[in-house]
Every structure is written in structure tokens, then in C-alpha cells.
Image (spheres, grey):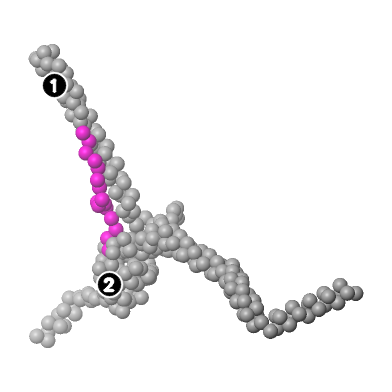
Amino acid sequence: MDEICDYDEYTMHCNECIDNNPLLKFFFLTSLIPFTMLFSMWVVAKFVYDPYIDAIKDIEEEEEEEEEEELYEDKYPIEENLEQKEDIDTNNFVFENTPNGTVFMRYNKENEDFEYWCDDKQILYKYLETVSRKFVNNFDCQDLYIDRKREIELQKEKKTKKNKAKSEKEEIEEEIEEENSVFAKLKPKVETKTKVKNVEVDVAIRGNKYKYMDKIKNFLFIPNKKKETKIKKMSFSDWKSQASWF
């Protein structure tokens, strides 16, 4: 019992000491505040900040992938079509929003060119190529489109073959001259190397023709047909009756 009483007395004196000593409360609070702040910062960083940063990175990566996926000038690749239409309706047209503005386009069969309306007269040629591909794909007339890149490749191949044939011909002619020469045996044979120039072809000989017509506000969805003037046939009696008036 004495020990219990001593313990109770000790506890009572400690409580009195804490109550009467404000410094202990101050140190206790100052040690608790940093812990609370650190814990709240960890919660915000773990469950708010990190997910937000990850979401922003995902959005930026998606936008970069979309930009890298397809340029505007690469849109509407020519579709393979075995059943193409030969007759083209002059009322057929397409409109397209290009980086240089909106374009209306149709095909003129008589002039064999693509006519276009656009507010920007200096629209880039590669954008017109894109719109014309959309036109031929929409109306099943892919044969009207001339692939400029393909034409350049064909020109390069043709020029390479021509240069190769020319170099081979020159080598044969030199060998014949050496064999027929009187001094062929006296002179050592010198190997001649023909250099083939690098083939650089950037402009296609054949290409699509485009004709600027006017601004979009002046585009007619149904073109005006030229009025045909009918010449009335006149008989001799009609002419005689009209001549009597003079």
C-alpha cells in the first residue's frame, strides 16, 4: 500500500509540475506542428500532385503523337479502285479546310485541270494536291490524279538507266579505239573509270494542273451553262419577204 501511495503521490506531483510549467506545453506543441505539416504535405504530394503531373504528361505525349502521326499534306492517300467513273459531273465539288484556309474545288474535264476557289490566292501547291486527292477519292476518278512523288521516282530511275547506258557505251568505244590503235601495244592500258553523276530530280515533268478561279463568296454550287444561240434557218421565200421591206 505504501508503494501505491508513493506512486500516486509521484503522479500527482508530476501533473502539478506540468500544469504549472507552460514551457512544457509550448515545446510539446512546437514539436507536434512540424509533424502535422510534413504529414499533410506528404498526403497532398502523394494523392494530388503526382497524379496531376502524370495526367499532364499523358496529354502532352498524346498531342505530340497526333502531330507526328500525320501531316496535312499526307492526308487522303489515293485509294485503289478498279471501277472508276469515266463521266464526271461538272456539279461535283469538294470543300476542305486547309492550313491556308477553306478551299472549294471541282474538275474541269474540257481543260483537264482542277479549278479552285479560295480566299488565299497564294495557297501552297501541296495543299491543293491534298484537296484534289480528296476529290478523286470521293467521286471514284483516281485516274485523274497524277502522283507527283511517283513521277519524280520514275524520272530518277529513267535518268539513272540513261546515264548507266551512256557510260557503258563510252567504255566500249574506248576499248575499240585502243584495239584499233597502232600504238596500243606500246602504251600500257590505263583503266578509265566513268563517273555517273548523282541524279537529283525534284520537279516532276507531269503534274496536276490547278486554276485559281475566285474567292469563296463568288463560288457557284451549280455552274452557269452558256446560253446556246439558235440560228433559225431561213428559206428563200422568207428572205424574199424580208427583202421586200427594203
Q: Is residue 113 visible?
A: no
Residue bearing the label numbered 1: 177
Q: Earlier in the sequence, mark 1 or mark 2?
A: 2
Asked if 72 appears above or below 120 in the picture, the reply is above
In this orientation, does residue 145 appear?
A: yes
Magenta: predominant secondary structure element? loop
Furthest-right residue in this view: 1
Q: Is 179 rendered above or below residue 64?
A: above
- Rounded to the nearest angstrom, the CA distance separating label 1 from label 2 is 63 Å
The kind of secondary structure element at disc 2 is: loop
Choose between 184 and 85: the one closer to the eye: 184
Judge from the rendering whether residue 39 lies leftward or rightward of residue 209; answer left or right.
right
18 or 230: nearer the viewer: 18
- Categorize mark 2 by other alpha carbons within 10 Å: few (<14), some (14-19), many (20+): some
Q: Is residue 69 magenta?
A: no
Q: Which residue is mark 2?
A: 120
The quadrant in which residue 84 appears is bottom left
The span shown in magenta is 195-210
Q: Is residue 197 left or right of residue 80?
A: left
Q: Residue at x 51, y 67 (%)?
A: 53
